Amino acid sequence: MLNDLKPKEIVERLDRYIIGQNNAKKSVAIALRNRWRRKQVPEDLRDEIAPKNIILIGSTGVGKTEIARRLANLTNSPFYKVEASKFTEVGYVGRDVESMIRDLVELTVNNVKAKQQEAVQEKAATIAEERVLDLLLPGSEPKSNGSGSDGKDENNVDSNFSDSFPLKIVSEMMGAIQEGDSNVNDNQNKIDIVASKSDKNISSTREKLRKMLKAGKLDNRLVDMDVPSRAMPMIEIFTNAGMEEMGINMKDMLGSIMPKNTKRRKVKVSEAMKILSQEEAAHLVDMEKVTSEAVDLVEQSGIIFLDEIDKIASNGGGHGPEVSREGVQRDLLPIVEGSSVPTKYGIVKTDHILFIASGAFHVSKPSDLIPELQGRFPIRVELHSLGKDEFKRILTEPKNALILQYMALLRTEGVEIEFTDDAIDRISAIAVDVNNRTENIGARRLHTLMEKLLEDILFEAPDTNDNKIVVDAVFVDNQLLEIVKDEDLSRYIL
Ligand SMILES: Nc1ncnc2c1ncn2[C@@H]1O[C@H](COP(=O)(O)OP(=O)(O)OP(=O)(O)O)[C@@H](O)[C@H]1O
Ligand SMILES: [Mg+2]
């Protein structure tokens, strides 16, 4: 399992996406390993061991968020990113801080549910197939219909349906199939099905339809079915009005009181299969298990990324917004220290959630945070700003490197694009230059530069006869140098 990665292995994996920032990688790797270690510790001591939360310090665009996000992905840990400064906004009420826990749980429940639904996908599809056949051939259902049916009952169909079975429906069905637009002009199939009319053998018709369904030959046919309609917006409005604080979800409550809102619609068979598979998958999943697994995951391996923590640190002053900043820190404290937060999925203990805070700390310093909070973030790592060599590597090395992204995008138009080494060198040099002269936005500068650099190519790609384009230093200079020289222009464009 990925959860027992050694620190070195964690760093190795982070290296695939993030260039440099070795200290930060090392710290997060240790924090993650400590979690695993804690789980091996005898139980009486285990609960005493608190996570060593981390503050990542570094200016914008140097990889803070990226490191935390990749780390969470690596281990499938529930991950939630929240801007600490959001809580200083007007209208902020103390308990809102707890909403990050509720959001994390909500997210995790959805993920766990999705995973479990995937696990029962095959079973759900089998049941959905039966239900679609029911829609296609009403009256031919096996005895136990829909959910829970394992499809074995089909052999009994004959005894359930006497000769008086409304053959009209079947023949209408056949007619419908014959006049059907699309894929169903396969003569062999028509003949087969028409023949079965005289068979009076519903079950064999059903089997034939099943074959066609499986082969995708009915995909474009329309069936009438009850389709769940979207939640009513009216209810959305008042879920936001603070009820959530009590862990009560109005939508769920009303949802169970009010009749299920469905609408009869004509849908394509392919879509019906999708809708019904989802519905059946949802039935098959045990929500109680999902919830308790999700809560457990959050408590044991959740990671909360507290962005812009520097914005809630107060540096001197003492009136106006300062007050509320410190207030936010005080509100954060119990959550970071470990408390029980009520959510609609039950109480969630935050004691072992790992908090990774991040901020530029240009104006304030970590020491401007209230002492209690400082104590809860014992690990401080500085991320350094990125230079030319790092930019060169960021452009080419990560698995999701920008250059690779553009190559893939253009390949879809039949255009192969290649970047020479000196082009990469020029782009990186220009990125450093623009960062120095305007604002240092770190690696994000590469995004704006690349987009401008390739603008014409991206525009022309579908119409061009060139299916091989080489970007070299001369091309880079032609595209970018004018803009780079003009500081005002680069402020706007790059
Ligand atoms: N060291 C790096 N290696 C590879 N890519 C990087 C690196 N640093 C930044 N990037 C890229 O730059 C973009 C911005 O990075 P990220 O979101 O991590 O910035 P940040 O440090 O969180 O900045 P902010 O303080 O503005 O939130 C991402 O698309 C990321 O891929
Ligand atoms: Mg960030």
Image (cartoon, rainbow, N blue to C red):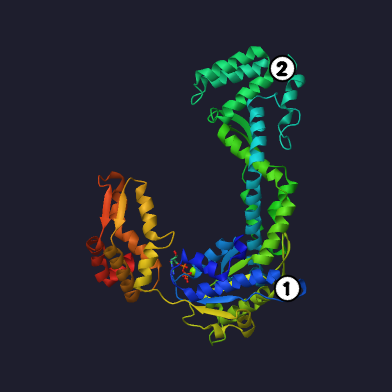
Asked if residue 261 is positioned above or below residue 112 in the image, the reply reads above
Secondary structure of the residue carrying numbered label 1: helix
Identify which residue, 86 or 136, lies in the foreground. 136
Q: Residue 54 carries which label?
A: none
The quadrant of the rendering that contains the C terminus is bottom left
Asked if residue 231 is positioned above or below residue 46 in the image, the reply reads above
The answer to whether residue 268 shows anywhere in this view is: no
Q: Which residue is drawn at 74% across and 37% down?
A: 148
Q: Which residue is drawn at 25% across and 44% down?
A: 465
What amino acid type should be assigned to the residue bearing mark 2?
A: Phe
Q: In which quarter of the image is residue 240?
A: bottom right
Quadrant field for ligand 1: bottom left
Q: Which mark is residue 46?
A: 1
Asked if residue 131 is positioned above or below residue 401 in the image, the reply reads above
Q: Mark 2 points at which residue?
A: 165
Point out residue 58 in the picture as x, y percentages from the top left corner: 47, 76
Q: Quadrant of residue 262?
A: top right
The quadrant of the rendering that contains the N terminus is bottom right
Instruction: Give the crowd class for mark 2: few <14, some 14-19, many >=20 residues within 10 Å.
Output: some
Question: In the rendered structure, which disc, 1 or 2, sits on the residue that comes first in sequence?
Answer: 1
Closest to the camera, between mark 1 and mark 2, is 1
Q: Which residue is drawn at 67% across and 39% down?
A: 123
- In this rendering, would 313 be left or right of 140? left
Q: How far is disc 1 from disc 2 in space, using C-alphas?
A: 68 Å
Point out residue 399 in the picture as x, y percentages from the top left corner: 44, 59
What amino acid type should be assigned to the residue bearing mark 1?
A: Arg
